[in-house]
Amino acid sequence: MKNALQLKNALEAKQKGVGFWLTFPSAPLVKTVLNGGGFNWVLVDAEHGQISDGDYYNLVTAIAASGASPIIRPPNAEEWMIKRALDAGAHGIMTPMCHTAADAKKIVAWNKYPPKGTRGFGPMFSSHAFGITEPEYPGAADDNLLVIVQIESRQGVENVEEIAAVDGIDVLFIGPYDLSKFMNVEFGGKEHEDAIAKVLAAAHSAGKTAAIFCSSGAQAKKRLDQGFDMVSIATDVGCIAAEFERQLADTHGVEMGKGRKVY
Ligand code: 3PY
Ligand code: MG
């Protein structure tokens, strides 16, 4: 299994985790982006993306075959949703809205087989995204699959040290958009940035990976320079929409964002 763990191996080697957000249920799309190289993980977004659990297997195996780690974000932190995502072969699970250490402990348990946790047994397809046989998977899964929780609420930030200390939590991943909404503060303002800095420090003092969602390469560079270990640099839908907008603006010889005129 170890050879396939692009993200975990990079983080352990003190390299950065550089990924992007997949919201379309398209293996050709994700393989097209990965074909250019440069990414060691992809987030398969079943929370807000147009992806459901019937799409997981094809996406996960396509991403793994292209040399990146597929991380699935189920719609919610629920045991059955995590089980479906793990059984499709995810290299890690990112759950939204972790508010307390009690939440974090439940999430860890749902990601691990007994006796460590309560993950049900049925890994008929999970091994396909790791280049191993089915019998090899169960013994390797608990120690190698990443448990990633999102910190994206005022309560999550208040409890972040306790969450970071939970055994089995590997990555604290900031959702900056929900964080600004749930804190009711300006995105990018001082309270927002102070909360982000607090999560970064808490992750590092607990020896955990600090990660954050970004919507551009410029933002991602700023976060890596700030000390984050792992970033997502953009979304598929954002890149596609922006590039069409740019080409349309050039077509009409106008500024970006003003090209929606039909002649
Ligand atoms: C957020 O910013 O809230 C996220 O979860 C990233 O998509
Ligand atoms: Mg969010």
Image (tube, rainbow, N blue to C red):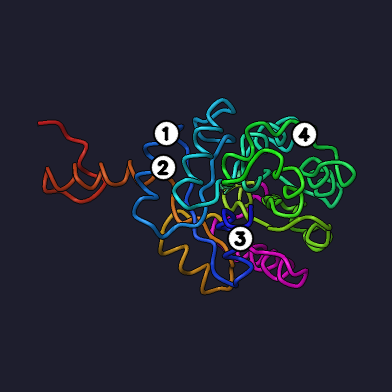
Name the spot of residue 167 as percent of width and height, x first.
83, 58
Question: Circle 2 sits on which residue?
Answer: 30
Label 4 within 8 A of ligand 2 by Cβ = no
Q: Report if the CB atoms under discs 1 and 4 are less than 8 Å apart.
A: no
Q: Secondary structure at mark 1?
A: loop
Question: Circle 1 sits on which residue?
Answer: 26
- The image shows residue 193, relative to residue 119, as above or below, that is below
Q: CA distance from mark 2 to mark 4?
A: 27 Å
Q: Could you tell me which quadrant the C terminus lies in?
A: top left
Q: Amino acid at mark 4?
A: Glu
User: Which of the two discs, 3 and 2, labels the residue nearer the N terminus?
Assistant: 2
Residue situated in front as seen by the camera: 203 or 253: 203
Q: Secondary structure at mark 2?
A: helix
Q: Amino acid at mark 2?
A: Val
Q: CA distance from mark 1 to mark 4?
A: 26 Å
Q: Report if the CB atoms under discs 2 and 1 are less than 8 Å apart.
A: yes
Name the spot of residue 147 as percent of width and height, x first.
71, 51
Please state the extent of the stretch shown in magenta in the rendering.
Answer: 182-211
Report whether 249 appears left or right of 233: left
Residue situated in front as seen by the camera: 78 or 8: 8
Q: CA distance from mark 2 to mark 1?
A: 6 Å
User: Which of the two discs, 2 and 4, labels the residue nearer the N terminus?
Assistant: 2
Q: CA distance from mark 3 to mark 1?
A: 25 Å
Residue at (37, 48) in percent of width and height: 33
Question: Circle 3 sits on which residue?
Answer: 211
